[in-house]
Image (tube, rainbow, N blue to C red):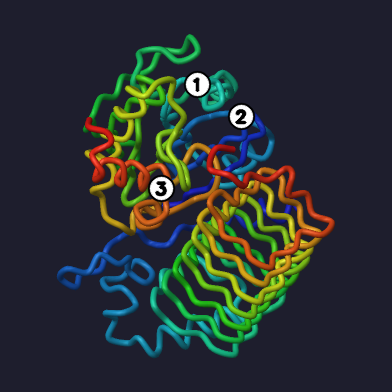
């Protein structure tokens, strides 16, 4: 499996192209479809089968229309429509088979109600829910608590060596996030001190 | 630059994400085989091959070698390290000058007296590593993860660290002169005796609230 990260100037976000041994391809979060990304797809002779959307914010979906015009892949998301394109709905613990790849989805709401995290082998595509060193911004304390609880229950139990491919910023591993993610550390500290209860 | 990156990605692979067959071992296998480097019966040979690949091979990719030690090696000029995992390794007196590091993991490593001059790094992970008496100069290391590093008596001058993350790191007696620090994060980092001459720390993030 190849995982090719691509930096998008649209929203300073990461787009990931994943290709299996038979050249079946997945794009995760088509923020911006520029020449570099198209060259990655074409130079690897990719048969682009699917687009996985972590959440429908424009910083992660603005390039979907371009991809649909060129490749017409299936779109997978929590919601039934992304930027007017019909999507196959994915729910918590849903499993999708794309080419030789098995994708497991986790619903991690908080940053947005439709936030999904995708696990392919040991690579975790976290969108905005978990980024290197912090967690996503939220509109309220309740949403922040919901996000942290979802991360703790569904994501942080995965193996330490799981690779983290976030929607923004640098790559990471779960081991690194467990040790150095300031938001999660702060939550644990507050929780132990009895300052919050969720 | 773009053409070079594209050429590299044509041959891009990710290290095998299959786990070692040894009971209770969750490490990744060396290169899609049955065992991780640590549990491989021919560890010595594997390490020799990796050293040979680093020093004279065309490219180092698709491998995972954790907790190995590399001493006194000079990587081939123009060497490309792509999609590789070197977690928990020790690099002593190693020269990485004029190399390309893409989507590779050097987390929780120990670097002593190592040199990284004119390197091109994207999506590299050095989190939790210790750098002692190391030089990183005139390099582009963008979108990279230096969270929780310990750097002491190092020279990190003349680099582009755009969008890299040094949060929770401890940087002592180290120069970060003439660096591009736009969107670089130093949140909750401890910096003692660190100089930022001719750099743009005003475009970096320092406090947790930033």
Distance CA(mark 1)–CA(mark 2): 10 Å
* Residue B128 seen by the camera: yes
> Which residue in the rendered view is the most extreme toward the right?
B198
The quadrant where residue B194 appears = bottom right
Identify the mark nearer the N-term, 1 or 2: 2
Mark 2 nearby-residue class (10 Å; few <14, some 14–19, many ≥20): some
Residue visible at 15% across and 70% down in the picture = B23
Mark 3 nearby-residue class (10 Å; few <14, some 14–19, many ≥20): some
> Which residue in the rendered view is the most extreme toward the top?
A84
Distance CA(mark 1)–CA(mark 3): 27 Å
* Residue B78 seen by the camera: no
Chain letter of the residue beneath label 2 in the structure image: A
Residue B180 picture location, percent across and down: 76, 52
Q: Mark 3 vs mark 2: give the one in front.
A: 2
Residue highlighted by disc 1 = A57
* Secondary element type, mark 1: loop
């Amino acid at each position: 499996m190849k995982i090719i990260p691509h930096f998008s100037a649209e929203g300073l976000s990461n787009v990931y192209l994943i290709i299996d041994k038979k050249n079946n391809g997945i794009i995760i979060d088509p923020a911006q479809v520029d020449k570099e990304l198209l060259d990655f797809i074409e130079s690897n002779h990719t048969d682009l089968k699917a687009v996985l959307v972590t959440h429908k914010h424009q910083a992660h979906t603005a390039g979907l229309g371009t991809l649909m015009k060129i490749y017409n892949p299936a779109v997978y998301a929590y919601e039934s429509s992304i930027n007017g394109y019909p999507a196959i709905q994915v729910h918590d613990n849903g499993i999708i088979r794309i080419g030789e790849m098995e994708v497991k989805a986790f619903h991690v709401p908080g940053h947005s109600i439709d936030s999904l995290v995708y696990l392919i082998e040991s690579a975790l595509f976290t969108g905005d829910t978990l980024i290197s060193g912090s967690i996503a911004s939220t509109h309220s304390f309740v949403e922040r608590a919901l996000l942290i609880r979802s991360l703790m229950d569904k994501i942080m139990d995965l193996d330490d060596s799981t690779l983290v491919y976030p929607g923004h910023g640098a790559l990471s591993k779960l081991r690194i996030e467990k040790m150095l993610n300031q938001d999660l550390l702060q939550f644990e500290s507050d929780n132990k001190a009895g300052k919050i209860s969720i | 630059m773009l053409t070079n990156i594209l050429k590299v990605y044509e041959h891009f692979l990710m290290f095998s994400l299959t786990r070692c067959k040894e009971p209770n071992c969750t490490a990744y296998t060396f290169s899609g085989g049955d065992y991780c480097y640590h549990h491989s019966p021919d560890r010595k040979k594997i390490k020799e091959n990796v050293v040979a690949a680093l020093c004279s091979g065309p490219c180092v990719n698709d491998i995972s070698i954790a907790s190995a030690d590399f001493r006194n090696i000079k990587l081939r000029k123009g060497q490309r390290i792509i999609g590789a995992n070197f977690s928990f390794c020790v690099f002593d007196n190693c020269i990485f000058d004029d190399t390309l590091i893409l989507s590779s993991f050097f987390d929780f490593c120990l670097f002593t007296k190592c040199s990284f001059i004119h390197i091109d790094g994207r999506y590299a992970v050095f989190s939790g590593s210790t750098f002692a008496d190391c030089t990183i100069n005139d390099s582009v290391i963008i979108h990279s993860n230096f969270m929780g590093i310990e750097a002491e008596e190092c020279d990190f001058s003349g680099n582009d660290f755009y969008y890299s993350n040094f949060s929770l790191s401890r940087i002592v007696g180290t120069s970060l002169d003439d660096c591009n620090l736009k969107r670089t994060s130093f949140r909750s980092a401890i910096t003692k005796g660190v100089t930022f001459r001719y750099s743009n720390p005003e475009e970096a993030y320092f406090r947790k609230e930033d």
